[in-house]
Image (tube, helix red, strand yellow):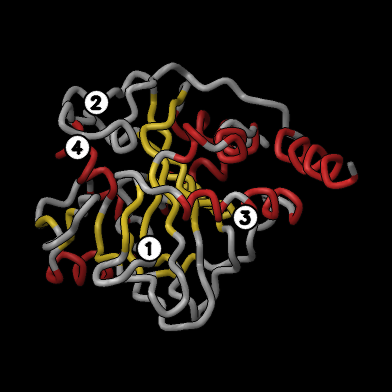
Amino acid sequence: MHLTSQQIEEFDERGYLSFPGLLDAEEVSVLNAERRHLYARDGAEVVREKGSDAVRLVYGAHAYSDPFNRLSRLPRLLGPVEQLLRGPAYIHQSRFNPKTGFTGGVWNWHQDFGTWHREDGMPKPICVMTAILLDDATAVNAPLLVVPGSHRHGEVQETSPEPDAKGYTVMQISQHMLEALARDGGIEALTGPAGTVVFIHCNLVHGSSNNVSPWPRAIMYMNYNHVDNQPTGGNNRAWFHNNPERDALQALDEDALHALARKAAAARAG
């Protein structure tokens, strides 16, 4: 997939681009079959919801899961990312947010770059968050909310670390600042069917409510950084927060996830 000049201008102006159906049903099925392996992990890369055993985050799947590694290098994702970054990219961080029904917790308003700049020493906001919807995201199951155009204000300084957060860092934005940004840009919900992919500027202000519905709203985030924008600090951060593997990614064949589906079907057939 090749972005048009108009789409790149829209991203630069609004801070995100959404593509429903960028992954088809078979590809989504391959990725969702891998979810049970992510949930079964028991390392520091797995973060639980506060006061619950429900999974809040699983970091680093691009490094240890073949389906998600292939996902990160699909030309449909990597090509547009390189256009938006104006150069080659690597995965700074990947994270899976299952947002399970009844237990998926709130994410306070924040910018991802705020954490990466503060914790990892990422020099500039030349990074694209790529959100891959693995469930249908609707108005009722706590969709991701964004403030269009908020990335153009730069890194918000009126922030503080989310209290009592364990296993992750969120630099939450003050209510006063959020009100000002929302007056300017409004707030939009990123909804769409499973298989939707959204390219998001790393300074776009975003958050989500707790999921009080019975239905999950899982998103895999592949966060791509320009290879010339490598963090200069963060030595106290684990590999799954600040990836030390920083060579430019090489695209796979567009059929890479379908190949896994065919392999699984052949194995079932014996």
- Of callouts 4 and 1, the N-terminal one: 4
- Of callouts 1 and 2, the N-terminal one: 1
Instruction: Give left or right: position of 245 versus 35.
Output: left
Q: Residues within 10 Å of mark 3 (few under 14, many from 20)?
A: some
* Mark 1: secondary structure: strand
Proximity of marks 1 and 2: CB atoms separated by less than 8 Å: no
Residue at image coords 34%, 18%: 228
Instruction: Give left or right: position of 165 versus 76.
Output: left
Q: What residue type is labelled 2?
A: Pro
- Of callouts 3 and 4, the N-terminal one: 3
Q: Mark 4 points at which residue?
A: 117
Q: Name the residue under label 1.
A: 146
- Of callouts 3 and 2, the N-terminal one: 3
Nearer to me, 26 or 33: 33
Q: Name the residue under label 3.
A: 32
Residue at image coords 25%, 31%: 124
Instruction: Give left or right: position of 86 versus 33.
Output: left
Residue 260, horizontal then vertical, whole percent: 74, 38
Q: Residues within 10 Å of mark 2 (few under 14, many from 20)?
A: many
Indicate the quadrant containing the N terminus: top left, top right, bottom left or bottom right: top right
Indicate the quadrant containing the C terminus: top left, top right, bottom left or bottom right: top right
* Mark 4: secondary structure: helix
Q: Is residue 222 visible?
A: yes
Which of labels 3 and 4 is toward the front? 3
Q: Residues within 10 Å of mark 1 (few under 14, many from 20)?
A: many
Q: Which amino acid does label 4 sit on?
A: His
Which of labels 3 and 1 is toward the front? 3
Residue at image coords 63%, 49%: 31
